[in-house]
Image: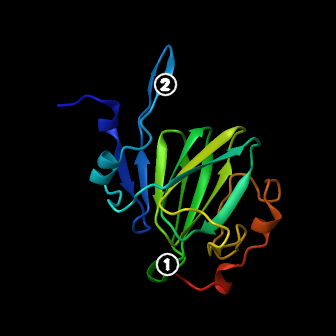
């Protein structure tokens, strides 16, 4: 019998098949905190695909509140979590069988989300100095083919906590196509 903090990990299924939200406990004391972010065996027991083999970790630092990135559907699976801060996240299924289905949630350091290939993902920082980490099961390369979706698509009607007119968004992300103009995976 184990009393480790990682034994308290919980999973929440979402309306998007394969998109899983994990609640990861944080142990705190007068020294600070400790957290187990990724333990494959324990997460797999809760539904993380056993085939998810991490080959790369990326970290995005976002120093300003309102930084908004996405919507990107990469040709790999990924597990996202925050090291610090709070973010609003939106996910849109671009796979043929669930095309257009959406899920939104808030991500904090005690939440991780597994995003299967074909689901577009985005986030908006709700405070400054947000570190967004993601583990992926394929190496990034400049030749990788993504699918993109416009953050302001009126058919999605995402209720961004910070208006997109006040958000910090790259020109590239502002100019992604609308849902009606893309083909499903």
Q: Give 116 or 110, whichever is nearer the viewer.
A: 116
Q: Is residue 80 left or right of residue 64?
A: left
Which of disc 2 and disc 1 is earlier in sequence? 2
Report crowding for label 1: few under 14, some 14 to 19, many 20 or more residues within 10 A (C-alpha).
some
What color scheme is it? Answer: rainbow
Q: Give 148 or 77, whichever is nearer the viewer.
A: 77
**Where's residue 7, x and y in %?**
29, 37
Q: Residue at image x 66%, y 69%?
A: 157
Q: Residue at image x 73%, y 74%?
A: 176
Residue position marked by numbered label 2 in the rendering: 33
Q: CA distance from mark 1 to mark 2?
A: 38 Å
Q: Residue at image x 41%, y 35%?
A: 25
Residue position marked by numbered label 1 in the rendering: 95
Report crowding for label 2: few under 14, some 14 to 19, many 20 or more residues within 10 A (C-alpha).
few
Outermost residue, left direction? 1
Q: Does residue 84 sit above or below 181 in this rendering?
A: above
Q: Does residue 153 sit above or below 163 in this rendering?
A: below
Q: Give 168 or 138, whichever is nearer the viewer.
A: 138
Q: Residue at image x 43%, y 66%?
A: 15
Q: Is residue 9 left or right of residue 77?
A: left
């Amino acid at each position: 019998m184990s009393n480790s903090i990682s034994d308290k990990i919980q999973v929440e299924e979402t309306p998007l098949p394969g998109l899983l939200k994990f609640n990861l406990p944080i142990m705190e004391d007068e020294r600070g905190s400790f957290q187990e972010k990724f333990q494959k065996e324990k997460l797999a027991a809760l539904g993380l695909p056993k085939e998810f083999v991490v080959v790369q970790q990326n970290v995005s630092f976002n120093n300003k509140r309102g930084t908004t990135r996405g919507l990107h559907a990469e040709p790999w699976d990924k597990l996202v979590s925050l090291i610090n801060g709070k973010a609003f996240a939106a996910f849109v299924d671009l796979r043929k069988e669930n095309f257009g289905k959406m899920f939104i949630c808030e991500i904090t350091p005690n939440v991780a989300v597994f995003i299967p290939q074909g689901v577009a993902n985005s986030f908006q920082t709700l405070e400054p100095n947000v570190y967004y980490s993601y583990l992926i099961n394929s190496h990034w390369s400049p030749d990788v083919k993504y699918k993109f979706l416009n953050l302001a698509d009126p058919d999605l009607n995402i209720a961004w906590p910070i208006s997109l007119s006040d958000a910090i968004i790259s020109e590239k992300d502002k100019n992604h196509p609308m849902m009606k103009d893309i083909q499903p995976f």
